[in-house]
Image (cartoon, rainbow, N blue to C red):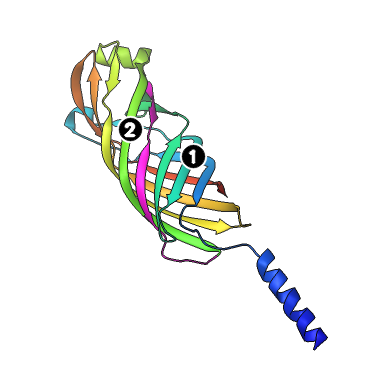
């Protein structure tokens, strides 16, 4: 009888010490890691040949769990820097920030692996746009501007719980970004950037 009681006490102690898997209402999950933005560019007739290169920066997300299955996420990052090319030749560059707010759904509860999907609204602001000497010669303009963009963002990701507080995260986004291209204040065309973004990082649960 004493052996059985001791065994039961040990089992209960192990259960108490085991990580509590799954997200709970009120949890705040902060994730950080390298994030790559890879534009999938399409253009109109006036901007044919324009392309935008990829860039990697520090990605940051924070999710507030409204329930074990639903959360609200804010996506941020350090500024992405992109070269702009025309028919393979670099003509300028820009920086951008893509803050995004998404509603997330976690289909599994009480599990070590937590896949999720999300849908939200992205706002991309461009700044520090500039033609280089080649771009100025090609366009006859000195000032490049890209208008800010609002668009839909789709997300899929997965949290893998390492401890009750620490987790590994992978996530991907497809974002709708459209911008008007202006040279010396005159619109010369429209570019759909529509990037894929991917992030791998660590997260902490508070």
- Is residue 129 among the parts visible in the rendering? yes
Q: Residue at x 34, y 16 (%)?
A: 131
Residue farthest to the right, as pictured? 2
Residue 144, by quadrant, is top left
Q: Which of 21 and 12 is in front in this view?
A: 12
Q: Position of residue 158 (x, y in %)?
A: 48, 56
Q: Residue 45 carries which label?
A: none
**What secondary structure is found at the residue carrying circle 1?**
strand
Which label sits in the foreground, 2 or 1? 1
Asked if residue 73 lies in the magenta stretch, the reply is no
| Residue 42 rendering spot, x and y as whole percentages | 26, 38
Frontmost residue, 2 versus 134: 2
Q: Which residue occupies 52% across, 45% down?
A: 31
Q: Distance between the residues labelled 2 and 1?
A: 15 Å
N-terminal of the pair, mark 2 or mark 1, is 1
Q: In this view, does 149 lie above or below 130?
A: below
The answer to whether residue 187 is above or below residue 117 is above
Q: Which residue has dot 2 on it?
A: 124
What's the magenta region? 92-111
**Location of residue 199 in the rendering, given as x and y in whole percent from the top left corner:** 49, 45
Q: Quadrant for residue 98, please give it.
A: top left
- Provide the residue designation for mark 1: 60
Q: In this view, does 53 lie to the left or right of 159?
A: left
At numbered mark 2, what does the secondary structure look like: helix, strand or loop? strand
Q: Is residue 127 above or below residue 45?
A: above
């Amino acid at each position: 009888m004493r052996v059985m009681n001791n065994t039961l006490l040990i089992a209960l102690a192990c259960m108490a010490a085991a990580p509590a898997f799954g997200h709970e209402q009120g949890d705040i999950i902060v994730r950080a890691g390298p994030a790559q933005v890879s534009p999938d560019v399409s253009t109109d007739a006036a901007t044919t040949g324009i392309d935008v290169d990829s860039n990697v920066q520090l990605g940051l997300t924070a999710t507030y769990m409204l329930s074990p299955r639903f959360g609200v996420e804010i996506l941020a990052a350090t500024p992405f820097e992109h070269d702009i090319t025309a028919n393979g030749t670099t003509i300028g560059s820009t920086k951008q920030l893509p803050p995004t707010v998404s509603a997330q759904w976690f289909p599994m509860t009480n599990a070590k692996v937590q896949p999720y999907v999300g849908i939200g609204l992205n706002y991309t602001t461009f700044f520090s746009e500039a033609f280089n000497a080649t771009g100025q010669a090609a366009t006859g303009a000195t000032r490049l501007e890209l208008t800010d963009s609002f668009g839909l963002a789709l997300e899929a990701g997965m949290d893998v719980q390492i401890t009750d507080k620490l987790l590994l995260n992978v996530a991907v986004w497809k974002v709708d970004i459209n911008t008007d291209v202006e040279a010396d204040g005159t619109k010369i065309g429209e570019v759909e950037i529509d990037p894929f973004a991917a992030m791998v990082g660590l997260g902490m649960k508070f």
